[in-house]
Image (cartoon, rainbow, N blue to C red):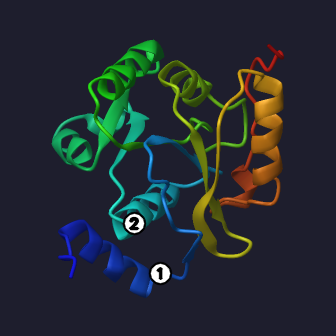
């Protein structure tokens, strides 16, 4: 019988009282990128963390550097956080690639929306990391219209950015996020086809 870990126990309590229902919960067996979208509320992070803990999935996640200031830094790192300095976003890509090259197995949860507003394109870091590290991309979702969240399909990126984003757009087309007014279409700033 599997021992109940502290994170799994916390997740069990969270899901017992949550109005949300986890569906399609299984994280892939192989390491990769997990997109968390639409990212419209801080609750998105809480839900994805609870889903990962429920499944004992080894995760890391990217968060803005301000989340790691002061006493929060050690807590966020312990929860799997990697600080992203928006002034130097390429540093975090290199850091993640170094962890992958060192053989560390984890699911990297990225919210490519970047901020919780309804403006601007998605950040392309998830695509660059997946391509450079040869990692698959799994589509995680939060959908207020059904009060569900979960893990969708896993795709291999082809290098044809426009075609890959068409697949991603199709999956998220009916997903509203926690705050549907802040949802934005999955689109990168530069989607020229390779």
Give the quadrant of residue 94.
Answer: top left
Q: Which mark is residue 18?
A: 1
Residue at point 57%, 35% (across, down): 114
Disc 1: CA contacts within 10 A as few (<14), some (14-19) or many (>=20) = few
- How far from the left and from the top, in percent, is residue 183? 73, 50
Residue at point 26%, 50% (across, down): 79
Q: In the drawing, does residue 30 fall left or right of residue 190?
A: left
Mark earlier in primary sequence (2, 1): 1
Alpha carbon distance from label 2 to label 1: 10 Å
Q: Quadrant of the N terminus?
A: bottom left
In the rendered image, which residue does mark 2 sit on? 50
Please identify, in this view, whether the residue under mark 2 or under mark 1 is nearer the observer: 2
**Residue 87 visible in the snapshot:** no
Give the quadrant of residue 180.
Answer: bottom right
* Nearer to me, 145 or 161: 161
**Residue 148 visible in the snapshot:** yes
The image shows residue 1, relative to residue 93, as above or below, that is below
- How far from the left and from the top, in percent, is residue 166? 83, 37
Q: Residue furthest bottom?
A: 16
Q: In the drawing, does residue 56 fall left or right of residue 178?
A: left
* Nearer to me, 9 or 87: 9
Residue at point 78%, 22% (across, down): 160
Are the residues flagged by discs 2 and 1 in contact, CB closer than 8 Å? yes
Query: How many numbered discs sit on the rendered protein?
Result: 2
Residue at point 34%, 30% (across, down): 83
Q: In the drawing, does residue 189 fall left or right of residue 23?
A: right
For numbered disc 2, what is the local secondary structure?
A: helix
The image shows residue 91, relative to residue 152, as above or below, that is above
For numbered disc 1, what is the local secondary structure?
A: loop
């Amino acid at each position: 019988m599997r021992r109940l870990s502290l994170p799994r126990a916390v997740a069990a309590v969270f899901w017992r009282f949550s109005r949300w229902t986890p569906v399609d919960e299984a994280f892939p067996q192989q390491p990769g990128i997990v997109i968390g979208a639409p990212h419209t509320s801080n609750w998105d992070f809480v839900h994805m963390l609870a889903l990962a803990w429920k499944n004992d999935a080894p995760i890391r996640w990217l968060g803005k550097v301000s989340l790691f200031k002061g006493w929060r830094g050690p807590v966020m790192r312990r929860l799997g956080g990697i600080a992203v300095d928006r002034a130097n976003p390429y540093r975090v890509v290199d850091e993640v690639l170094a962890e992958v090259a060192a053989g560390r197995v984890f699911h990297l949860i990225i919210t490519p929306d970047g901020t919780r507003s309804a403006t601007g394109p998605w950040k392309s870091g998830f695509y660059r990391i997946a391509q450079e590290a040869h990692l698959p991309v799994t589509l995680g979702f939060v959908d207020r219209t059904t009060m569900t969240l979960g893990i969708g399909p896993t795709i291999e990126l082809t290098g044809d950015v426009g075609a890959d984003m068409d697949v991603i757009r199709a999956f998220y087309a009916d997903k509203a996020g926690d705050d549907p007014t802040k949802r934005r279409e999955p689109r990168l700033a530069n989607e020229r086809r390779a």
